[in-house]
C-alpha cells in the first residue's frame, strides 16, 4: 500500500510525525504528535492531492497488557480518500497521567460522536470538543469500561433518580403520590 | 428537564391591521421521542426541540442496546467472537460474520479456499437482499403503506429459510470460521436459492410498483432529509446513503475482496441526497445483489471450504479420534483459540449500510486484544440532526427510515 500520504504529511509538516510504521498486512501507519494532530488532519483533508474527506472512525487501544505498555493509550484515526482510493491510518500516543488529545471536530464533523465514544469508554479527553459527554453509557456511570483494569462484570453503584420537572407521577408502589 | 422560553415573534403591526393578523406568541417545546417508540427503529431516544411543527434542535441519545461487544470479545477466543458479531447488524448477520473473519484472516495472513470465498460472497449478498428488503418494507410501513411491508417480509422469509438451511439459524447465523467455513452447502441448496430469488424478484417488482411512482410516497420523500456530498463525507457516511448524495464509493469495487472482481454488477449512484434517492439506491441494489448471487451460483467451483492447516482449522473428526496429532491440534484450537500473530489491522467490507470496518489488535495469543467495529450506522446516525433540523417533525420519520439505523451495530 502506498505511503504517499504519509510522505506528503512528513514533507509539509516535518515535526508532526513522530514515527512511521508498517503493520503486518503492509499498511503504513503514522504516529502523530498530539499537538500536531489538528494541522495534520487539516492537511490530509484539504490538500488536493490527498483529499481524505471521508471520515471513517476513531478508537483507542489500552496497552496495559501489551509490550511496550507506556504510553498507556493509543488513539487511532482512520480516514478515506475517494480520489486516491486509500485509507489513512494515524495514531496518537497518550499517557495515563494526562489523557488529553486535541479534538478534530473542527476539521471533520463526523469526529463528534467517535470522540465521545473514546471519552466514554477510555476516559481520554478531547480538548475543544463542543459537547464531550458519555454516548453509550449513562451519565452517572463510574469508570471507563473498555480500560483493561475495568472488570468484565463490574458492578456500579445505585444512582439517585434524576430530578425532572413537569412530569406527572401517578400513585405507584414507592408511596410517592 | 423541560424548560420553555417564550419567543415573541411580534413585530409592529402595520396600519389598519387588526388583532386577527397579529403574530402568535409561540413556545419552544421540548419533546422526547423516547426509547420505546414505534417509529424509532430499535431503542433510540431523541430529544427534539420544536418550534410549532419545525424541528429546531434534535439530539439522539443512544446506548439503550449497548451490550459490551468489545469487552466481551476481548475475553473469548477469535472463533468465539462470531456469535457476538452476529448480533451487531442483526438484519444481515452473515455480513458481520464474514467481515470479521476477513479482517482476522488478513491479520493472520491466511488465504481461504476459492469455494469458501464464493460461498461467503453468496451469503453476504443474500443477507444484503435481506437487509435492504427490511429497510424498503419499513419505509413503506412507516409512511402508511402496510402492503409493501408484507411483501418485503415474505421475501425476507424466503431468504431466511435458505439461510437456515445453510447455517442452522434464521437470524444469528455464526457461520464461518477463521480459515473458511464450518460447513459446506446442503444438497440442492443452489436450486432452492434460485427459486427463492425468482419469487423475491416478483416481490421486489410489486414493492416497486406500489411505492416508487406513488404520489404520496414521492411527496413525502423527495427533497426531504437532504445532505450534500461534502457533508456526507464529513460525517462519515458510506454505503447507499453516501451514494445517494452522488459519491461513487463501494468497497466491493474500490478494494475487491473474495471474488467480487469476477462478478459483473453495477453500483447505483444518486443525485439529490434526499430520502427518495436513498430509497432508490436500496431498491436498485436489491436487483444488483440478485444478479450477483445468480452469477456466483453458476461459477461456484468444487473444493474444500476451509484451509487444511490444523493450527487454524479443526482437523477432521476421524483424525481427532484416531491420531495423537489430531487430538492435540483440536485441543489447542478449542482451549486456546486460533493463534493470530501479534499486530494490528484495519480492514473493511461493504455491509448493507456501508463500510463495515474492523480494527483488530492481536497480542499473539488465541484471544483478541481489541476488536473495534466501525459500524456504518454510527456515522450515519450522527449526521441525522444535520438532515432534519429545519424540517417538520413528520419529516423525521422517513429520514430515520432511509438511513436504516440498526441498533445492534450502532450501539455494539
Image: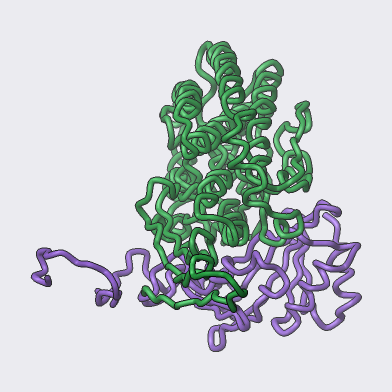
Chain colours: A purple, B green
Q: The N terminus of chain B is located in which quarter? A: bottom left
In the image, B79 versus A42, the foreground residue is A42
**Residue located at (37% from left, 56% from top):** B35
Q: Tell me which corner region of the image, top left, top right, bottom left or bottom right, holds residue B370.
A: bottom right
Q: Is residue A33 left or right of residue B341?
A: right
**Residue located at (72% from left, 85% from top):** A35
Give the farthest residue toward the bottom.
Answer: A97
In the image, A56 versus B402, the foreground residue is B402
Q: Tell me which corner region of the image, top left, top right, bottom left or bottom right, holds residue A34.
A: bottom right
Residue B289 visible at all: yes
Q: Height in image: B1 above or below B323?
A: below
Q: Height in image: A112 above or below B181?
A: below
In the image, B247 versus B12, the foreground residue is B12
Q: Is residue A74 left or right of residue B34?
A: right
Q: Is residue B277 left or right of residue B410?
A: right
In the image, B309 versus A78, the foreground residue is A78
Residue A69 visible at all: no
Q: Position of residue A27 (x, y in %)?
A: 76, 57
Q: Height in image: B237 above or below A116?
A: above
Give the farthest residue toward the front.
Answer: B16
Q: Position of residue B43 (x, y in %)?
A: 40, 53
**Residue located at (60% from left, 51% from top):** B376
Q: Height in image: B366 above or below A168?
A: above
Q: Is residue B22 left or right of residue B358?
A: left
**Residue located at (70% from left, 75% from top):** A106
Q: Position of residue A170 (x, y in %)?
A: 15, 64
Q: Position of residue A87 (x, y in %)?
A: 76, 57
Amino acid at each position: 500500500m502506498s505511503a504517499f500520504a504519509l510522505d506528503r504529511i512528513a514533507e509539509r509538516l516535518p515535526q508532526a510525525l513522530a514515527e512511521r510504521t508498517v503493520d503486518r498486512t503492509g499498511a503504513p501507519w503514522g504516529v502523530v504528535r498530539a499537538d500536531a494532530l489538528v494541522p495534520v488532519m487539516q492537511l490530509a483533508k484539504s490538500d488536493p492531492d490527498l483529499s481524505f474527506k471521508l471520515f471513517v472512525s476513531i478508537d483507542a487501544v489500552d496497552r496495559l497488557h501489551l509490550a511496550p505498555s507506556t504510553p498507556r493509550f493509543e488513539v487511532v484515526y482512520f480516514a478515506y480518500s475517494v480520489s486516491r482510493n486509500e485509507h489513512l491510518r494515524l495514531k496518537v500516543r497518550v499517557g495515563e497521567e494526562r489523557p488529553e488529545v486535541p479534538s478534530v471536530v473542527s476539521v471533520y464533523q463526523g469526529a463528534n460522536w467517535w470522540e465521545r465514544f473514546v471519552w466514554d469508554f477510555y476516559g481520554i479527553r478531547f480538548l475543544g470538543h463542543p459537547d464531550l459527554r458519555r454516548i453509550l453509557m449513562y451519565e452517572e456511570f463510574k469508570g471507563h469500561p473498555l480500560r483493561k483494569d475495568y472488570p468484565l462484570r463490574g458492578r456500579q453503584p445505585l444512582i439517585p433518580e434524576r430530578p425532572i420537572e413537569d412530569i406527572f407521577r401517578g400513585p405507584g408502589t414507592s408511596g410517592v403520590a | 428537564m423541560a424548560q420553555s422560553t417564550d419567543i415573541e415573534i411580534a413585530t409592529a403591526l402595520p396600519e389598519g391591521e387588526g388583532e386577527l393578523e397579529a403574530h402568535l406568541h409561540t413556545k419552544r417545546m421540548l419533546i422526547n421521542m423516547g426509547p420505546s417508540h414505534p417509529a424509532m427503529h430499535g431503542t433510540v431516544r431523541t430529544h427534539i426541540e420544536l418550534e410549532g411543527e419545525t424541528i429546531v434542535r434534535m439530539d439522539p441519545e443512544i446506548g439503550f442496546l449497548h451490550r459490551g461487544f468489545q469487552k466481551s470479545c476481548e475475553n473469548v477466543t477469535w472463533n468465539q467472537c462470531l456469535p457476538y458479531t452476529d448480533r451487531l447488524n442483526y438484519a444481515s448477520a452473515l455480513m458481520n460474520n464474514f467481515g470479521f473473519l476477513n479482517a482476522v484472516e488478513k491479520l493472520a495472513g491466511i488465504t481461504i479456499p476459492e469455494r469458501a470465498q464464493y460461498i461467503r460472497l453468496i451469503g453476504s449478498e443474500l443477507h444484503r437482499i435481506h437487509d435492504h428488503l427490511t429497510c424498503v418494507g419499513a419505509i413503506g410501513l412507516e409512511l402508511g403503506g402496510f402492503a409493501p411491508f408484507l411483501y418485503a417480509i415474505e421475501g425476507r422469509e424466503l431468504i431466511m429459510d435458505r439461510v437456515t438451511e445453510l447455517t442452522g439459524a434464521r437470524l444469528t447465523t455464526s457461520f464461518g470460521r477463521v480459515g473458511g467455513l464450518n460447513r459446506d452447502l446442503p444438497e440442492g441448496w443452489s436450486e432452492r436459492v434460485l427459486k427463492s430469488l425468482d419469487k423475491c424478484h416478483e416481490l421486489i417488482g410489486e414493492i416497486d410498483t406500489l411505492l416508487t411512482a406513488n404520489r404520496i410516497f414521492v411527496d413525502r420523500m423527495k427533497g426531504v432529509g437532504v445532505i450534500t456530498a461534502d457533508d456526507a463525507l464529513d460525517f462519515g457516511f458510506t454505503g447507499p446513503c453516501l451514494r445517494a448524495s452522488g459519491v461513487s464509493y463501494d468497497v466491493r469495487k474500490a478494494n475487491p475482496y473474495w471474488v467480487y472482481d469476477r462478478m459483473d454488477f453495477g453500483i447505483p449512484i444518486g443525485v439529490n441526497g434526499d430520502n427518495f434517492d436513498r430509497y432508490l439506491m436500496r431498491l436498485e441494489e436489491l436487483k444488483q445483489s440478485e444478479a450477483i448471487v445468480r452469477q456466483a451460483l453458476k461459477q461456484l467451483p468444487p473444493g474444500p471450504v476451509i484451509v487444511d492447516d490444523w493450527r487454524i482449522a479443526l482437523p477432521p473428526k476421524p483424525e481427532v479420534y484416531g491420531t495423537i496429532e489430531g487430538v492435540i491440534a483440536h485441543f489447542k484450537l478449542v482451549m486456546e483459540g486460533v493463534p493470530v500473530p501479534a499486530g494490528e489491522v484495519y480492514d473493511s467490507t461493504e455491509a448493507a449500510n456501508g463500510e463495515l470496518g474492523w480494527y483488530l489488535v492481536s497480542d499473539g495469543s488465541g484471544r483478541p486484544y481489541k476488536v473495534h467495529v466501525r459500524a456504518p450506522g454510527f456515522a450515519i446516525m450522527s449526521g441525522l440532526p444535520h438532515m432534519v433540523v429545519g424540517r417538520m417533525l413528520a419529516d423525521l420519520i422517513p429520514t430515520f427510515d432511509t438511513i436504516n439505523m440498526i441498533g445492534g451495530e450502532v450501539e455494539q
